[in-house]
Image (spheres, helix red, strand yellow):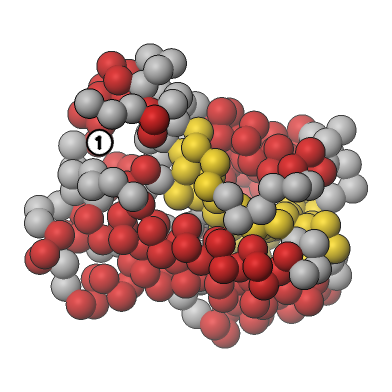
């Protein structure tokens, strides 16, 4: 199996519709040991049965907007495993009011929150887990087409994803000295809890079906398969890259 013996720490599983869940499921099917994080107590009740279903070694609370909680999470992971082979960052947040209307009306606070949770958290997690990364480790983050193109109502999140992708490239250089790869998956729209906050999301789905070369929207399994490649030794020469999983929509012009 592609991930036999590898330990994968996954941030962002909220329910079975989460991209992170699709990734975790394929990782487990391919031999990985799993640990899942949850942001706060109310989410723990949802994560526990998922962790049990997936046979996760443990779950850990981590608000990625808190350096203290990240440090506590790192200590917990070190106690359980001592090493991390794969880290998946599937975390993003923006205030609902900043995902509608005009981008110019984004509040200073809303802008800062979106950048902190959606982009800087990747930097903070990599810094905390750097001592635990195995020599051929893999870090991956989840991005979206709106990082480089204007998507209606994506607004502050588009800027946050652009910062995330740039962070991936800089982190790839810093961690590459140890052989750790850092990449991002730019996934097409999927019906997740996060997507439900974006006004006009169903219109976006319909547009993808009409315009994408493959004439369909992607599935959680599509993203999971790409993540499986990035987590495995098959991607040993790939780092600092943004891999599109969007039925080819990103290549289209007029």
At x 83%, y 57%, the residue is 136
| Residue for badge 1 | 201
- Residue 210, how many percent across, how many down? 28, 16
Establish if 57 lies above or below 145. Answer: below
Left or right: where 210 falls relative to 101: right
Q: Nearer the viewer, residue 145 or 126?
A: 145
Left or right: where 205 falls relative to 228: left
Which corner quadrant holds the N terminus? Answer: top right
Residue 252's image quarter? Answer: top left
At x 22%, y 55%, the residue is 155
At x 57%, y 68%, the residue is 170
- Residue 182, how many percent across, how many down? 64, 57
Left or right: where 217 falls relative to 196: right
- Residue 183, how many percent across, how many down? 60, 52
The residue at the far right in this view is 5
Q: Nearer the viewer, residue 192 or 131?
A: 131
Count of numbered labels shown in the rendering: 1
The crowding category of the residue bearing disc 1, from other C-alpha atoms within 10 Å (few below 14, some 14 to 19, many at least 20), is some
């Amino acid at each position: 199996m592609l991930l036999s013996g590898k330990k994968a720490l996954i941030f962002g599983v909220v329910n079975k519709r989460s991209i992170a869940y699709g990734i975790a499921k394929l990782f487990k099917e391919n031999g990985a040991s799993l640990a899942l994080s949850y942001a706060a107590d109310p989410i723990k009740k949802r994560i526990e049965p998922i962790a049990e279903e997936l046979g996760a070694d443990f779950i850990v609370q981590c608000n990625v907007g808190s350096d203290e909680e990240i440090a506590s999470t790192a200590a917990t992971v070190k106690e359980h495993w001592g090493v991390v082979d794969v880290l998946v960052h599937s975390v993003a947040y923006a205030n609902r009011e900043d995902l509608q209307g005009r981008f110019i009306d984004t509040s200073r606070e809303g802008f800062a929150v979106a950048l902190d949770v959606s982009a800087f958290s990747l930097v903070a997690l990599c810094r905390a887990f750097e001592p635990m990364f195995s020599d051929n480790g893999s870090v991956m983050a989840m991005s979206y087409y709106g990082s480089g193109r204007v998507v209606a109502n994506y607004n502050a999140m588009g800027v946050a994803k652009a910062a995330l992708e740039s962070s991936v490239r800089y982190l790839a250089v810093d961690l590459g000295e140890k052989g750790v790869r850092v990449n991002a998956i730019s996934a097409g729209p999927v019906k997740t809890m996060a997507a439900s906050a974006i006004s006009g999301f169903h219109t976006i789905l319909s547009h993808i079906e009409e315009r994408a070369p493959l004439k369909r929207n992607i599935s959680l399994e599509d993203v999971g398969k790409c993540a499986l490649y990035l987590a495995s030794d098959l991607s040993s020469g790939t780092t600092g890259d943004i891999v599109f999983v969007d039925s080819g929509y990103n290549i289209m012009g007029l």
